[in-house]
Image: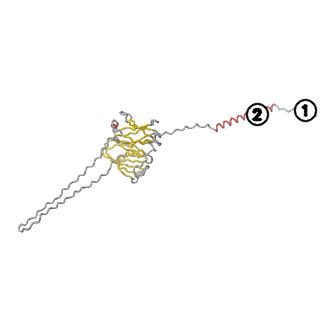
Amino acid sequence: MDTDRSPSRLSPWVVALIVVVLSLVLIGAVVGVGALVNLMTQAEPAPEPPVPLQAMPLPEPYIWLTPSHGAPGIAVIVTGHEWRHSDTVNLYFDDPRHEHIGRALLGAVAVNDDGQFVVAITIPDFAPWSELTALLVEAESPTTGARASAGFLITPTDIATPVPPTPIIPTPTPFIPTPVPPTPIPPTPVPLPPTPTPFIPTPTPFIPTPTPMPDVTEWRGEYFANPHLVGDPTFVRHDLDINYNWGLESPAPGVPADSFSVRWTRNASFQEGNHRFFALVEGSVRIYVDDRLVVTADELPPSPPREVHGDIYLTAGVHTVRVEYVNTSGPALIRVWWEPLP
């Protein structure tokens, strides 16, 4: 006889156990996902903000004058660098003290594709400009507003070179011997020989040939084909003044345009007191007075010409001035002068 059985039921404690297990599994899953998200967040740091790029400053335009001093009416070369290419630049004269004269427009000059220009001007030889001791040459771009200036020292009109005196040629006095008359013999009438005509030699005057004086001027310049002033100079000459703007050209025959040096030496008279020595240089320069270093400036990377100076006390009399200039590369420019201090 078959016995009927009802379907089996889960007891309440089993159901409760299953619910607890599922809850733990669900909680574990939520916690694990949270930990994973936190770990991924820490592993990937936030990107740093980009560093802004700084624009490189553009070089300042500048000009220089060749020569930078002279008498009214002299022609001067104005050279400009670092201007905006294909621009137009106006040139002016101006009173450096801005007391008596306003700016005077000279004209306009075009800038080439390399940012440079070269133009010739004439220093005024009429009042009121000729009455100044210095004036400014200014360059200005009406497009960009860029400006640059350079000073020009006005010196008195050059003194004419004295003509050497004509040598005096002494006129020699000729020696004329006095003839002695013959003694007559009275007893024997012997005919007397004719009186000889004395021979008076005409002396040829000695005219010494004047030895031409060498054209020796103020400075003895020794030019070396190396930047160290060593060995024998390649070229030697006498220079009236140290005021050169060779640019990228050779300073003398046989001397390269780069990596050269020059030594100038001269004796000069000074009054007692303090004196200031100046140098406008593109390269390096040292100025010595009686072997004492007064001015020094080392060569810098390509830059506009700069002015340096130094002071020294001198006794009255003659002192030896020596200038040593070195250019290793780039444009070459050197100008030297001095003045007494009050």
Furthest residue to the bottom? Answer: 188
Decide if residue 310 is in sight here: no
How far apart marks 2 and 1 lie (CA) works out to: 35 Å
| Quarter placement of the C terminus | top left
Q: What SS does tag 1 mark?
A: loop
Mark number displayed over residue 155: none
| Quarter placement of the N terminus | top right
Furthest residue to the top? Answer: 12
Furthest residue to the right? Answer: 1
- The residue sitting at 90% across, 32% down in the picture is 4
**Which quadrant holds residue 159?**
top left
- The residue sitting at 76% across, 34% down in the picture is 22
Q: What SS does tag 2 mark?
A: helix
Q: Which residue is mark 1?
A: 4
Q: Are marks 2 and 1 in contact (CB under 8 Å)?
A: no
Q: Which residue is mark 2?
A: 22
Residue type of the residue flagged with mark 1: Asp
Q: Earlier in the sequence, mark 2 or mark 1?
A: 1
